[in-house]
Image: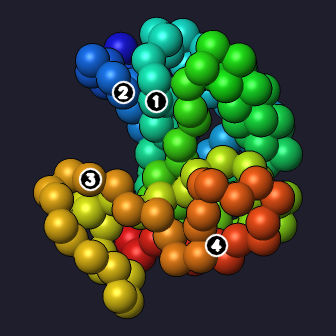
Amino acid sequence: MVHSVERFHVAMDVHDHVVELRPVGEIDIASVTAFRAALWAAPARPVLRVDLSGVRLLSAAGVRALVATHLRVRARGGELVLTDPDPVVARVLRVTGLHRVLPVRCSDRSQSLPGRSHDLPGRSHDLPGRSHDLPGRSHDLVACAA
């Protein structure tokens, strides 16, 4: 399934326990409606993973869409996970504090971060300093290598 606007599109893969969305392009006021529609069209699974590696820009409208989706997914007992943010997008996540609310991970498809383990192929790993067990704790956000 693909949702599209001229310079923006979203691909969706549905698995037993995970739905993965891969938006590509810029998430701004012009494309946020398509992004939000794709997020909300995702079937209920324990994990909704949004691969941000193809996103070049994440505006405030995109951040609001992620926060609304986080609340919606959490209300049904699931988890929204962001993966592989571009350095510009990682900066937006850090500046807005969203990296303190949502797990942000680098997958094995991206290049290695110093000290990162590769124990299972295809498994996502937390960014350094990220702890899911300590709410309210300050976390460092390091952009995943492209």
The residue wearing badge 3 is 123
User: Disc 4 designates what residue?
Assistant: 141
Q: Earlier in the sequence, mark 2 or mark 3?
A: 2
Q: Is residue 30 above or below residue 63?
A: above
Residue 8, position in %: x, y? 54, 35
- Label 1 sits on a secondary structure element that is strand
How far apart in space, not on screen, are marks 2 and 1 (Cα)?
A: 5 Å
Whether residue 88 is visible: no
Label 2 and label 4: CA atoms lie apart by 23 Å
Cα–Cα gap, marks 4 and 1: 21 Å
Tell which tag, 4 or 1, sits nearer the viewer. Answer: 1
Which residue position holds label 1? Answer: 47
Residue 59 in the figure: left or right of residue 103: right
The image position of residue 129, as x and y in percent, is: 59, 76
| Pointer 1 or 3: first along the chain | 1
**Which type of secondary structure does the marked residue at label 2 adopt?**
strand
Tell whether 70 sits left or right of 142: right
Amino acid at dot 4? Leu
Secondary element under disc 4, as helix, strand or loop, is loop
Residue at the spot 76% in from the left edge and 54% down from the top edge: 135
Q: Residue at x 38, y 62 (%)?
A: 125
The residue at the point 46 percent across, 30 percent down is 47
Mark 2 touches mark 1? (CB < 8 Å): yes
Which residue is situated farthest in the front direction here?
133
